[in-house]
Image: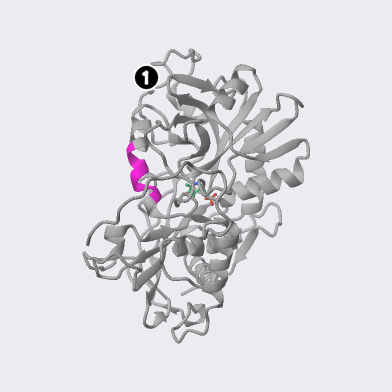
């Protein structure tokens, strides 16, 4: 198959053409078509057809503090799978023992990255109830991501029913204690065995659950020595008493991406949760880790627009130069460069509703602005927000030979704002605060 000639990319525009399928309106139209397309003869995703095959060799649950949990490879006893074919549509969904999948070496996903996923958590509340957090947002985004890479559509409500059933089956054993959570990974892959570059004719949706350590807290089993590169190498003053371990417990260290590595671009797929966004980022991520940083802060364009940090949306809290008011700034959604995080939306909604003294600003902002605000003492906090790492205050950012050491990193502050927002969200997730964002799950015995 001859490769398609690449046309030169025109300079990035901040907003997309209104006829584009990638605009909000364009995606909504696509979604509406996907959802209302019930005139087809093929079967739609139907949660009422779910069958359950219990695992007869269940495994023990490791202690939360065990090193095994930090491998992020401890799955629960079951997985939920649903097959799809172009000819017959969605099969009956199944909950079955967790185990290997069987696909052909020619499967589309193995060659053309036809994979998308979701990341969410189920929480055992202090009231004993199990909750999901705004799961309808994940369901809708899962469909949007699938649509972006030509995987089959489905009614998000049916997906949500399946997800809830699955959580209800696993929760009793795998999140038995109040305050515990488990990570949920819905996935879709194109399984069609054919090397031709074409829309997949077969797919598999599956959901698994993985025990996660609390990534927003320091790793108790991490005895790695203090990183000596990064900050120290670039000559920044650090506190004499600051070791890597207590730095880690105080905040995330970010390494700004190099000009020759871009995560996403307007018209690309940075706004879809697809595997193709991650493979090419691992080289930079590996470098960050080697140099003692936790995540890459992804920049975009010659202006060095700040976009997001690893699998997290990125926020800065600073004092406006003119008004002196506090502003919570984060990158905008319109150009498709960032992923619309459920945590991002929730931080914005929460601050808008409960902290009128803080202005919310969704706009493009540059590294230069951050450096200036820092020099002028107007930079108050920065933090990352996402399901996996939750709300993580930033201690410092290394940007091409310069360091932005935040008040947190100087041990003058503790990320009060980020921590207060985190507490509010946590209260909803664990049921301390009754809120429509916390969706209670019925547990079942199988
Ligand atoms: C998943 C993800 C996020 C965070 O989204 P949440 O819904 O808050 O978990 C942010 N950025 C990227 C690139 C992601 O993949």
* Residue 266 magenta-highlighted: no
Instruction: Give the side of residue 75 with respect to residue 270, left or right.
Output: left
Instruction: Relative to 257, say whether 333 is above or below.
Output: below
Q: What colour scheme has been applied to the protein in the rendered image?
A: one colour
Looking at the image, which residue sits at the far bottom?
41
Front residue (pair 138, 125): 138
Residue depicted at x 45% and y 61%: 148
SS label for mark 1: loop
Rendering coords of residue 35 (x, y %): 55, 74
Q: Residue at x 73, y 37 (%)?
A: 359
Q: Number of labelled discs?
A: 1
| Magenta residues, start to end | 277-283
User: How far from the left and from the top, in percent, is residue 117?
Assistant: 43, 58
What is the crowding at mark 1: few (fewer than 14 residues within 10 Å), some, or many (at least 20)? few
Residue 225, compared with residue 274, is above or below; it is: above
Identify the residue under disc 1: 228
When the figure is inspected, residue 49 is found, relative to residue 233, above or below; the finding is: below
- Quadrant where the N terminus lies? bottom left
């Amino acid at each position: 198959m001859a490769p398609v000639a690449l046309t030169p990319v025109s300079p990035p525009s901040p907003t997309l053409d209104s006829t584009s399928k990638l605009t909000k309106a364009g995606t909504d139209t696509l979604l509406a078509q996907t959802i209302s397309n019930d005139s087809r003869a093929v079967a739609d995703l139907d949660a009422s057809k779910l069958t359950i095959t219990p695992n007869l060799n269940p495994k023990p649950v490791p202690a939360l503090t065990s090193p095994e949990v930090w491998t992020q490879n401890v799955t629960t006893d079951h997985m939920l799978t649903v097959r799809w074919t172009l000819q017959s549509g969605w099969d009956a969904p199944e909950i079955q023992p967790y185990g290997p999948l069987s696909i052909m070496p020619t499967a589309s996903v193995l060659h053309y990255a036809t994979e998308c996923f979701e990341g969410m958590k189920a929480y055992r509340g202090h009231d004993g109830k199990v909750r999901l957090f705004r799961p309808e947002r994940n369901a809708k985004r899962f469909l949007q991501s699938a649509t972006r890479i030509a995987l089959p559509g489905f009614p998000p409500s049916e997906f949500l029913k399946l997800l809830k059933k699955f959580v209800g089956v696993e929760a009793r054993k795998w999140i038995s204690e109040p305050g515990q959570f488990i990570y949920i990974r819905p996935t879709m892959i194109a399984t069609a065995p054919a090397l031709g570059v074409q829309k997949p004719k077969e797919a598999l949706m599956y959901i698994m659950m993985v025990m996660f350590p609390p990534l927003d807290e320091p790793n108790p089993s991490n005895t790695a020595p203090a990183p000596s590169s990064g900050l120290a190498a670039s000559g920044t003053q650090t506190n004499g008493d600051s070791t890597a371990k207590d730095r880690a417990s105080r905040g995330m260290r970010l390494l700004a991406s190099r000009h020759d590595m871009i995560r996403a671009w307007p018209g690309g797929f940075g706004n879809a949760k697809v595997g193709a966004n991650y493979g090419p980022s691992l080289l930079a991520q590996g470098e960050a880790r080697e140099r003692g940083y936790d995540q890459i802060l992804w920049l975009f364009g010659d202006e060095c627009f700040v976009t997001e940090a690893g699998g997290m949306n990125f926020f800065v809290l600073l004092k406006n130069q003119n008004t002196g008011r506090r502003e919570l700034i984060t990158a905008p959604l319109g150009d498709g460069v960032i992923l619309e995080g459920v945590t991002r939306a929730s931080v914005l909604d929460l601050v808008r509703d409960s902290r009128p003294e803080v202005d919310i600003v969704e706009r493009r902002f540059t590294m230069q602005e951050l450096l200036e605000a820092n020099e002028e003492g107007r930079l108050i906090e920065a933090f990352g927000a996402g399901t996996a790492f939750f709300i993580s205050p930033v201690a410092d950012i290394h940007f091409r030979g310069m360091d932005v050491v935040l008040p947190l990193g100087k041990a003058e502050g503790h990320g009060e704002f980020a921590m207060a927002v985190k507490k509010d969200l946590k209260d909803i997730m664990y049921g301390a605060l009754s809120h429509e964002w916390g969706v209670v799950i019925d547990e079942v015995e199988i």
